[in-house]
Image: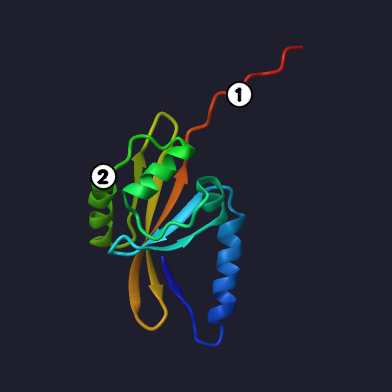
Amino acid sequence: MIISVSEAAKEHTKAFAQKLLDAIPLAIFVIDKSFKIRYTNKSLTSVIDCTPTAFDDELITNLKKMGVCDLSVEKISAVCNGLFETVGGIEVISTGKYSYLTLTLLTYMEREKEKLIMVALRGERPPQNCPKE
C-alpha cells in the first residue's frame, strides 16, 4: 500500500486518516525501522493508559492489560525486519489463545518514501457468562 500526501492537502489528509483509525475498535499503532512508534490510535491508548514512544519491553508490559501474554521484542523484531525487506507484506503473530498482531508494511510518502509497519492488535477476550433465564 502506498500513501501519498500532497503539500496542500497534507494536514487535511492526516486529520482524516487519524479520525478513521481512531474510529476502528481495534488497537492500532505504526512503527518505523528503529521501532519508534509514529502513531497510536485511541483504542490502544485508552486501554493501556499511556502513549508509547517505542516498541520495547515497557510497551509489552502495558499490552498485558489487553491480554497479550506471548510477545517479546525479539519476536516482533524478527517479523518486522523480514517485512521491511518485502514489498506489500502482511504477517500475523499469535500472542495468546485468542489474541494476535497483524502487521502490514506501508510505504508513506511525504517528502521521500519511507517504509513503516502498521500493527493491529486483538487482545484476549474473556468468556462471557450468559444471563440465566
Res 71 quadrant in image: top left
Q: Which mark is residue 128?
A: 1
Q: Is residue 124 above or below residue 1?
A: above
Query: What amino acid is at disc 2?
Result: Lys
Q: Mark number for residue 62?
A: none
Closer to us: 73 or 1 = 73
In the image, residue 70 sits, relative to residue 104, either above or below, namely above
Which quarter of the rendered picture does the C terminus lie within?
Answer: top right
**Dot 2, crowdedness within 10 Å: few (<14), some or many (≥20)?**
few
**Which residue is pictured at 29% across the width and 43% down the height?**
72
Q: CA distance from mark 1 to mark 2?
A: 31 Å
Considering the numbered disc 1 on the image, is that residue within a helix, a strand or a loop?
Answer: loop
User: Which residue in the rendered view is the most extreme toward the bottom?
Assistant: 8
Q: Relative to the observer, which residue lies in front, 114 or 69? A: 69
Q: Position of residue 125 (x, y in %)?
A: 52, 31
Q: Amino acid at mark 1?
A: Gln
Name the residue that disc number 2 marks: 75
Identify the residue at horizontal 54%, vertical 45% (top origin).
Answer: 47
Q: Name the residue: 45% across, 72% down.
A: 3
